Amino acid sequence: MTSVMAITFGALLYFQIMYLENMVKMRDAQFSEIVLRCLSSTGSYLEKRETMHFLQEDIAVMESSIMDFNNGSQTFGLSSEVIDSINGLISRQSKELGFNNSFESQIGKTISVDNIQSRYQNMQQTLRDQYLYQKGLLNEVILSILRDSGNRPPKERADSTIIRDYLRNELEESGLKIPFNFSVTNNRGQLIYTTNKFEKESPKNLYSQTLFPNTGSPLRLNVEFPQKNKYIFSSVRFIIPTLIFTVILLIVFLITIIMAFRQKKLSEIKTDFIHNMTHELKTPISTISLASQMLNDASVRKSEASLNRLAGVISDETKRLQFQVEKVLQMSVFDNSDASVKLTETDANLVIQNVVDTFKIKVEKFGGTITTQLNAENSFVNVDQMHFTNIIHNLLDNAVKYRDEDRAPVLAIKTFNPNETTLQIKVKDNGMGIKKEDLKRIFEKFYRVPTGNRHDVKGFGLGLAYVKKMVEIFKGSISVESDYGRGSTFIITLPLA
C-alpha cells in the first residue's frame, strides 16, 4: 500500500513537471512564431515604403516635363509619348469610323455590320496598346528601384523610428506587450546602428529578419527580448501552485512513512530491550536465590568457608544487580537531565585514576593490562562526579566487552591539555573495532553494534548514548576513531573550570 501511494505521488509529480515543461515549450514556440511574423511584416512594410519613395521620385520627374506646347495649346498631366499615342488612336479611329474630310456626306449612310466589328477590334487594340505602355512605365520604375536602392543610405532605408513604432504596433496587436531592443547590420555583419540597451556581445533571445533581400545591398534587422523568459514564465505561473502543493503532499507523505517506520523500529528496539533487561536482571536474582536456599542447609551453615563463599557470591551478585538497575535508571537522564546533575569543580585525573584502580581487576581477569598517562597539568572541570565516573567506567567496560578473543585486552587512557581552555581525555583499546557504517550510529539510544556470531556481549544499547548525553550536559564533545579489527579510540573534550 505504501509503495503504491509513493508511486502514485511520484507519477503525479512527474506528469505535472512534464506538463509544465510542454507548456513552456508551447509558449516559447508561439512567442517565436508571433515575433517572426511581425518581423516579416516589418520587412514588407519597409520594402513598400522604399517602392513608394521611388514612385514619388519618378512622378515628380514626369510632372516636371508635362508642359508640352503643341500649336499654342497645353496638355496637362500627359507626356509627349502618351499624347502621340492618343492622337494616333484618334486619327485611326476617325478614319476607321469614316470621320474624314467628307464627313457630312457620310451622315445619312447606314453603318454595316462589318464596320461595327472592325470598330470593336480597333478598341481592343487600343486598350492593349495602353496596357503595354503602362507596363513599360512600371518596368522603368522597377529598374530604377533595383539600380538606385543600393545607393541610398542604410539609415534612410531602415529608419530606426519607423522600425520601432511599426514593430511595437505589430507585437501589441498580436498580444505581445513586451520591451525589445534591436540593431541593423549590413550583409557583411557590420553594425549600422543599434538601440542603447542592445547587447552587442551576447544578446539574449535574439531574432533576425533580412530586409530588402532582392536588392544588391540587403540589410539585417536583429531584435532581442531581454524579458522573454519572464514573459513565458508569467503565462504558465498558474501551474506552479499545483506543483508546489503536490510537492508538499509528497513531503508530508514521506515524513509520515519515515515516522511510521521509525515507530515500528523503536517498538522492536524496546521489545529487544525488555528481553535483554529481563535476562540481565534474572541472572543475578537467580544466583542470589540459589545462595539463599543453600544458607538454609544446616551443613552449609556449619562450614565457615562455605558461608564466606556464599556471602561473597551474594555480595557480588547484589552489586551486579545494582549496576544493572543503575543502567536502566540512566534512561531518565534523556528525559530530565537537569534534575539529576549537580556540577562541581572536579579533578578529572583523580576520578579517572580511581576508576582505573577499580577496573584493573576486571581487565586482568582476561589477561589484559590497563595503563594511564594523566599528563594534563590542569585537570579541573565542572562535572557531576558520579556521572563523570560512569562515563569513564562505561568506556572501559565497552573496551572489555568488545575485546578481540584472539588477544588479551590492552587499554590505555590519557589526559592532556590541547590548549589553555580545554581538557582532552582519550580512551584507547585493541578490541574488535567499529565498522564505518556503525560509527555514525553508536551514540544512538538502544543501538548496539553487531557482534556477528558472538552472543556473550550483554547490554541495553544505552551506554554510549548516556555517555554522549552527559558529555553534552558538561558542555563538552565526544568523538571516536576506529580501525575495524584493530581497535578504537574515544576522545572526550571538556572545558576547564
Image: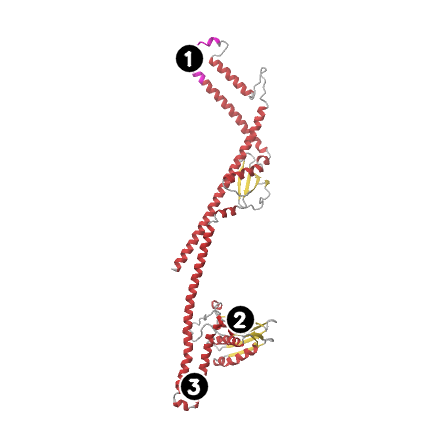
Which residue carries the number 1 mark?
A: 112
Local SS, label 1 = loop
Residue type at mark 3 is Leu
Q: Residues within 10 Å of mark 3 (few under 14, many from 20)?
A: many
Which residues are the magenta region?
104-120
Main SS category, magenta section: helix
**The disc label shown at residue 473, or none:** 2
| Mark number, residue 19 | none
* Residue that mark 3 sits on: 310
**Residues marked 1 and 2 touching at CB (< 8 Å):** no
Q: Does residue 486 appear in this view?
A: no
> How many badges with numbers are in the image?
3
**Looking at the image, is 42 positioned above or below residue 495?**
above
Placement of the C terminus among the 4 image quadrants: bottom right
| 106 in the magenta segment | yes
Q: Type of residue at label 1?
A: Ser
Q: Mark 3 to mark 1: distance in Å?
A: 164 Å
